[in-house]
Amino acid sequence: MNQLPTADTPAVYERVRAYTENRKQRVFIMTFGCQQNEADSEKLLGMALEMGYSQTDDPAEASLILVNTCAIREHAEQKALSKIGSFKKHKKEHPDCILGVVGCMTAQAHRTEQLKRCYPYVDFTLTPSRIHLLPSAVLAVLEGGRRYFLPDSGDPLECPDVRELPVVHKESFRAWVSIMYGCNNFCSYCIVPYVRLRERSRSAHEIENEVRTLVENGCHDITLLGQNVNSYHGDCRFPELLERLDRIEGDFLLRFMTSHPKDADPDLIRVMREGKHIAPHLHLPLQSGSDRILAKMNRHYDLNRYMDTVTRFRADLPDAALTTDIIVGFPGETEEDFEATLAVLKRVEYDMVYAFLYSPRKGTPAAEMQEQIDEKVKHERFDRLLALQDEISAKKAKAYEKCTLRVLADGQKAGSANTLTGRTDTNKLVHFKGDASLIGSFINVRIDRAEAFVLYGTIV
Ligand code: SAH
Ligand code: SF4
Ligand code: F3S
């Protein structure tokens, strides 16, 4: 059943095309998880189109279904498993349809075992570092009629090559661009280094070419992606990469995420201040306001160091947005530790906080720690944190009232055809009346009313 990779050579694509040619074969891709997965799905789509599939939004008419999974928290895995289960009926009615499960969940040996044993209608799995083998996996099923599970190498030091893959962006006006893959930080709670393996950076030259091509094709909003963009080490460091991309001519905004506080340096803030195209927004995950917990998390910074960066950022870019991630209920978190986190929220006044209930991940050090926090306590702290941040976000949003802001219109509000949605340069969500033909362009919107998470405005 196990099959070592052949190669994603043109010959493999060719052999798959022998099956798809003139047969109206369609691919449906469902994506869970973070922007890295969104970006990977755009590559999966790129490869599928090269194999002769066309895209569909309806799984019922698909002959290739790909579920791109996330493993960051238990809830994410359960959602993906339940989605996979929902395709059982379709597979029974359409035995020729190929169901592949890809992404972070499949890089854990115990999940691959589970998929093999309990989900017999799953035809193959591919880990995030091996998505380039999609054609080989599809071919193994098509030609050999066998299931394809790459053995987990089990090597936490594995550093796969960086490969350039065909990519099809979902939207023409907005795109993700991966600048690096993997993570070396091993925060004690986090599964990412185990499933996405060691950090590796794309060459600055390749990134520059991709961004230039996007801008030339009318893309206005480009997000550079990496688990820790500040440790980018292609042919230059991250601030220099940003400077190089900022010099590209055109009407576009450059966003980036995520910045690890241990590596975000003054140079980054200088480049953000001087850049023409760089979004005035920094996502700087704090995780906890307690030095004791930060040490147990293996984050390699303390609150003083974190606050130095915040102070410099605020001094240099006073109108920019600052957002963060917080984990509530990390093992051993006392009421006092939790209050230290609340105190930082009050002191920094983030524009937005993404809070998560700590979820033990098999194989990570934190999952083995004593003093796991009771679920009830976790939820109670979580609710207190959200209530505090709602107040702060509402207050921060108020400052936008009466201002006229540049907004990139990005869609229609669900259930309201004449209301458009858009994002400010600081990544705030805006609702305003407008025609769908405006989607994909920058427009100036005056903000009439501000709520914590939505600004309501009028086109000027
Ligand atoms: N590389 C990014 C984050 C990737 S994961 C960074 O270092 O900031 C996104 C967020 O998920 C993390 O910032 C963290 O807040 C949260 N997270 C990661 N592992 C988690 C876990 N086991 N339980 C709960 N939240 C977790
Ligand atoms: Fe996970 Fe830490 Fe790496 Fe972020 S930096 S992906 S939280 S290990
Ligand atoms: Fe999830 Fe993998 Fe992203 S675990 S958060 S999809 S890196």
Image (cartoon, helix red, strand yellow):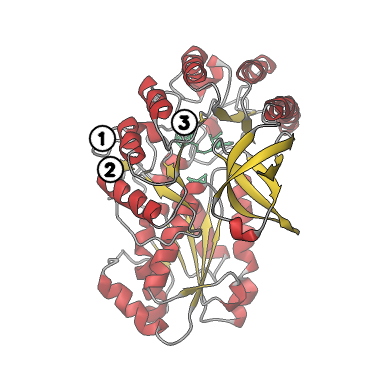
Residues at marks 3 and 1, CA–CA distance in whole angstroms: 25 Å
Q: Residues within 10 Å of mark 2 (few under 14, many from 20)?
A: many
Circle number at residue 331: none
Q: Going 49% across and 54% down the picture, which residue do you hit?
A: 173
Residue labelled 1 has its Cβ within 8 Å of some atom of ligand 1: no
Outermost residue, left side: 235
Q: Nearer the viewer, mark 3 or mark 1?
A: 1
Quick one: SS at disc 2?
Answer: helix
Who comes first in sequence, dot 3 or dot 1? 3
Task: Check disc 1 and report the residue beneath it.
Answer: 236
Task: Check disc 2 and report the residue beneath it.
Answer: 204
Outermost residue, bottom side: 22
In the image, residue 323 sits, relative to residue 234, either above or below, namely above
Who comes first in sequence, dot 1 or dot 2? 2
Residues at marks 3 and 2, CA–CA distance in whole angstroms: 27 Å
**Taking 150 as reference, is 411 left or right?**
right
- Name which residue type carries label 2: Ala
- Given residues 160 and 454, the one toward you in this image is 454
Q: Please provide percent x and percent y for residue 312.
A: 47, 16
Q: Going 42% across and 75% down the picture, which residue do you hit?
A: 141
Q: Please provide percent x and percent y for residue 287.
A: 56, 27
Q: Quadrant of the C terminus?
A: top right
Circle number at residue 187: 3
Q: Going 36% across and 49% down the picture, which residue do you hit?
A: 211
